[in-house]
Image (cartoon, rainbow, N blue to C red):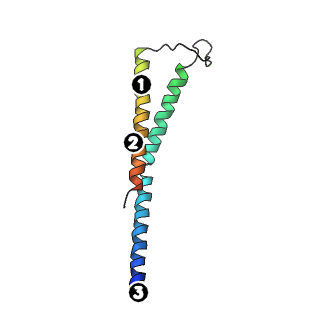
Amino acid sequence: MDAQRNSTAACAGKDELQVLRAQLTAHRDLEDAICSLQSMSYLLDEVLDSKLVDHQTRKQVGPLLTIMLTGHELEMLIFAYKNVAFRASSLQDAFYAAAEVGR
């Protein structure tokens, strides 16, 4: 009886180890999504930093400001913002899915 319990415990331990390995692999697979999100957030930061300043002094302005953007700049800003939001949401979903791998 003890041998059967030990065997069952060993199998359960191996199963748990396989689950942990699968989860670790799934989390490692998130590297590309993390790096892509970081790159896009950097680009968004650059766009915002270049547009949210006084165009004559290149310094950040006070609490009230007027932003002047061309149509192309506005499209670029909207694209960058929506892309970062989409990537962050996708990364969150992938993270939670990775935690469920093997379960």
Residue 55's tag is none
The reply to whether callout 1 and callout 3 are in contact (CB within 8 Å) is no
Q: Mark 1 is on which residue type?
A: Ile
Mark found first going from the N terminus, 2 or 1:
1
Mark 3 secondary-structure assignment? helix
Real-space Cα distance between discs 2 and 1? 18 Å
Which residue is situated farthest in the left direction here?
Answer: 102
The reply to whether callout 3 and callout 2 are in contact (CB within 8 Å) is no
Residue pointed to by mark 2: 90
Which quarter of the image is occupied by the C terminus? bottom left
Q: Mark 2 is on which residue type?
A: Ser
Residue pointed to by mark 1: 78
Residue pointed to by mark 3: 3
User: Measuring 60% from the left and 18% from the top, which residue is drawn there?
Assistant: 63
Q: Which quarter of the figure has residue 54?
A: top right
Mark found first going from the N terminus, 1 or 3:
3
Rendered view: 2 above or below 24 = below
Q: Nearer the viewer, residue 1 or 67?
A: 1
Q: Nearer the viewer, residue 92 or 76?
A: 92
Mark found first going from the N terminus, 3 or 2:
3
Mark 2 secondary-structure assignment? helix
Which quarter of the image is occupied by the N terminus? bottom left
User: Measuring 49% from the left and 13% from the top, which residue is drawn there?
Assistant: 68
Q: Mark 3 is on which residue type?
A: Ala
Q: Give the percent coordinates (x, y) of residue 31.
A: 45, 48
Real-space Cα distance between discs 1 and 3? 64 Å
Q: Residues within 10 Å of mark 1 (few under 14, many from 20)?
A: few
In front of the other: label 3 or label 2?
A: 3
